[in-house]
Image (tube, rainbow, N blue to C red):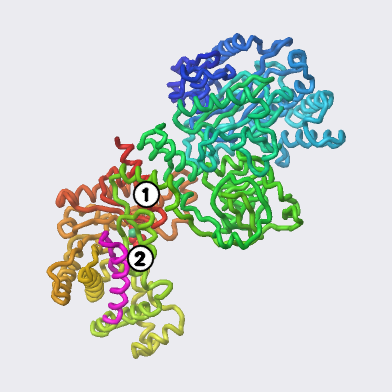
Amino acid sequence: MATKAAKTEKYVYSFGGGKADGNESMKNLLGGKGANLAEMAGHKDLKLPVPPGFTVTTEVCTYFYNHKKTYPKDLEKQVKNALAEVEKLMGKKFGDVKDPLLMSVRSGARRSMPGMMDTVLNIGLNDDTVKGLIAKSGDERFAYDAYRRLVMMYADVVIEKAGGMDPAKGKGIRKIMDERLEEVKKTKGVELDTELSADDLKKLVKEFKQLTKKHLKVEFPENPWDQLMGGIGAVFASWNGKRAIEYRRIERIPDEWGTAVNVQAMVFGNMGEDSCTGVAFTRNPGNGDDHFYGEYLINAQGEDVVAGIRTPAPINETSKNDHSKDLLTLEKFMPKQYKELDEYQLRLEKHYKDMQDIEFTIEKGKLFMLQCRVGKRNGVAAVKMAADMYKEKLIDADTAVMRVGPNQLVELLLPMIDPEEEKKNKPVAKGLPAGPGGAVGRVVFTSEEAVEWGLKGEKVILVREETSPEDVDGMHKSQAILTTKGGMTSHAALVARGWGKCCIVGCSDIEIHEKEKYFVTNTGKKIHEGEWLTLNGTKGVVYEGVLELTNSDLNKNESYKTLMKLVDKAKKLGVRTNADTPKDALQATYFGAEGIGLFRTEHMFYGEGSEKPLFLLRKMIMSTTVKERKAALNDLFKFVKKDIKATLEVMHGNPVTIRLLDPPLHEFVPHDKEKLQELAKELGVRMSVLNRRILALHENNPMLGHRGVRLGVSYPEITEMQARAILEAAGELQKEGKKAYPEIMIPVVMGRHELTHQNNIVEKVYAEVLEKLGLKKIDYLYGTMIETPRAALKGDSMAQVADFFSFGTNDLTQMSFGFSRDDIGGFLPKYLDLKLLPEDPFVSIDQTGVGELVRIGVEKGRSVKPKLKVGICGEHGGDPESVKFCHRLGLNYVSCSPFRVPIARLAAAQAAIEEK
Ligand code: PEP
Ligand code: MG
């Protein structure tokens, strides 16, 4: 990269005045923001009024880090030339004392990282140029306000943060200055910054400079050029700031990408009552409705909207909410400019064929477009927009399918507060619905606590006045976020929306007393740290205590149905589910499962209703003679058959893969004395005898021990009983005129001979069942799990006996890595930190290692049986990246837990489209 940057001659790309050096396709080089600024300014269909400027490329960032934080030789010259172009277009000069051009410096990575990196505004102001700004704007107060903001941002971002200074007692220069600002307001007896006079602000500028000198031992640079180069360097430095690194880790953005820097002429939304600034979306990002949606603030700068300090006003009627319903809309306030903005947003959406997030400013009645990018949206909105845009013929079917992230679908399946419960409870507060779904958790007031409690397994709700990028880790660990300030475009809302997290913002009904660790509602109710809250993020209401959550009804969601129709048309991979009960099976069919890929027979020995079968199983395990064991198995048979029959029945002839008993037997041995005594009595043996038998079952390494097919080899009666239960269940259904299609699956196999051994039992039973039921044929398949590396490598010989393979990638991962599936948590975090592993291999399949075993297994198996049916039933079957991998390997299906079925279907469709 470094040498490439050194050879590339163009580091700076200009835009503005109806043309641009770059365009939208150059995101890697110009970052998302820079590429879109170029597109908006220069594309023939757009040519929007963008304040002119230029982008310093991401390659310079890479160079910067590879060369001890220095720049390529030619950079300054290119920046100077680009600046001269801006001067020409604006008719002003940078550093001019009569009419100074002011610049902003902003970050812009390939993918948006909202608020994670730094910005410096109003660059070019000093004690001389400020006079020019006063003369030109005719507003001394405004000019000094701009100046004090520059000093503050510069000291914070460029001198302190980029300079790598560690603030004393954790109190940074920004905080020190903020406190000073508050003091001045207090002595003046005013509440808002805007109530301070020009003189107050002028004094503050001076004081801020002194504070900078005192605390940071560096002078604020008066030279505009030094300010500009300092600002550019600070943005590059912020790429490796703590927040940015943390965000990249969560969002999986590669460290190598680097950021670009956008330098742009300043326009002011705070130049008086005929100026404003706002953020808007071409459609509603909260629910997907096709309405132009946004917020704005009169006489304010962009950062004021995002910071959520004042409640923003709606741009139009459809953007109104409970908090803003009485505020003046932009449409009424400035009809001409609103109409122009509306026309631009339509043009932008048509051009980009996707929902756009727009920042705009109106300076003294003139509209400027500051930014546009593909807007973040929650899962509910993503599905609605994809379906709507497809119906509007704005996008084709494949694009619609690609528009929704598989994990976003989770939000549609999100728990909501049980409507009945909700009716019975009265909200304690109401705010803005920034992130949908229901959430229950205990109140914490700081991000650090959220992390701490979250790590202990506590469910928490982070309650704050507002959030800042420093809070991302705590926000991530929380079930939901509740803020008292801020609007739908505030930091909390943006971040929560990106993650699909339940979030309520602008909840001004409550007041936080952070030190005392409680908040109080407007009815005087106090809620302390650790107390439980329930949030309805879809409506924006807060309840005290724990309310039951339920799941939403997908069948009523027309957009979801439209999208999933397109999904099913596109996908080639089948999607089945792992289910052990008729209830789970039905749930999965509702989510679109095409069969059961894994029915774990041992399920019937755990949980509700398992008392009797478990007792019989224990009796069977503790038997010492075949005769005793057979007797116990005979009793057990009825339960097993009933269990299997019920599930086969609800699946109506769709395949049901039934795995024979897998866990090591000692798992079923009772631990409490009473149960042991009961068992001893039933078996007619003394406790000492029973204890001896239990000892004999003990395993040192149970996962690698006497389990899976080995049980069936040691105790063929177990296989026989299960095969009989399965085949009789299927045969009986057949006789009742119903369809059933069982697939008998043998677990933890290491080679063909084991399979043949078990198959002989199954075939013998099959003949007996046919005779018993008077049938000519029962449809079934006989197959194997591939869970040991050896089995994968012996795929060709296994396929001689098996009709199908199902990769049990949980055990296959465990045995390939030598990591215990139960204890990986002990060292995994360190492995991830040190990047020894890209991610948890039990979550997303290790494509080049374990995945290679799968590939070999499939290839070898199909070399013997070209039509061999192959699936996967480990947890990976519900992970989008793993599903895509399975598609590429040509598997027939993936199988996952019921709630992951829609996600797997979407991922399968996307894999098929990506392949095109
Ligand atoms: C597997 O090992 O991947 C599997 C599905 O079986 P189990 O999780 O039951 O061991
Ligand atoms: Mg397994």
Q: Quick check: 656 above or below 350?
A: below
**Closest to the observer, 785 or 646:** 646
Q: Residues within 10 Å of mark 1 (few under 14, many from 20)?
A: many
Say whether residue 885 is magenta: no
**Quarter of the image with the N terminus in it:** top left
Q: Which residues are magenta?
A: 634-660
Q: Which residue lies under the disc numbered 1?
A: 904
Residue 178 falls in which quadrant of the image?
top right
Horizontal and vertical percent for residue 914?
Answer: 33, 37
Q: Quick check: 102 above or below 778?
A: above
Visible residue check, residue 761: yes
Mark 1: secondary structure: helix
Q: Residues within 10 Å of mark 2 (few under 14, many from 20)?
A: many
Amino acid under label 2?
A: Asp
Horizontal and vertical percent for residue 533?
Answer: 63, 58
**Closest to the observer, 220 or 357:** 357
**Closest to the observer, 509 or 823:** 509
Q: Residue at x 34, y 69 (%)?
A: 602
Using the numbered discs, state the Cα–Cα distance from disc 2 to disc 1 in whole angstroms: 19 Å
Q: On the picture, is 252 further left or further right than 729?
A: right
Q: On the picture, is 306 further left or further right than 137?
A: left
Q: Which residue lies under the disc numbered 2?
A: 580
Q: On the picture, is 874 further left or further right than 59?
A: left
Q: Earlier in the sequence, mark 2 or mark 1?
A: 2
Q: Quick check: which quadrant has ligand 1?
A: bottom left
Q: Quick check: 692 above or below 847?
A: below
Horizontal and vertical percent for residue 237?
Answer: 58, 29
Amino acid under label 1?
A: Ala
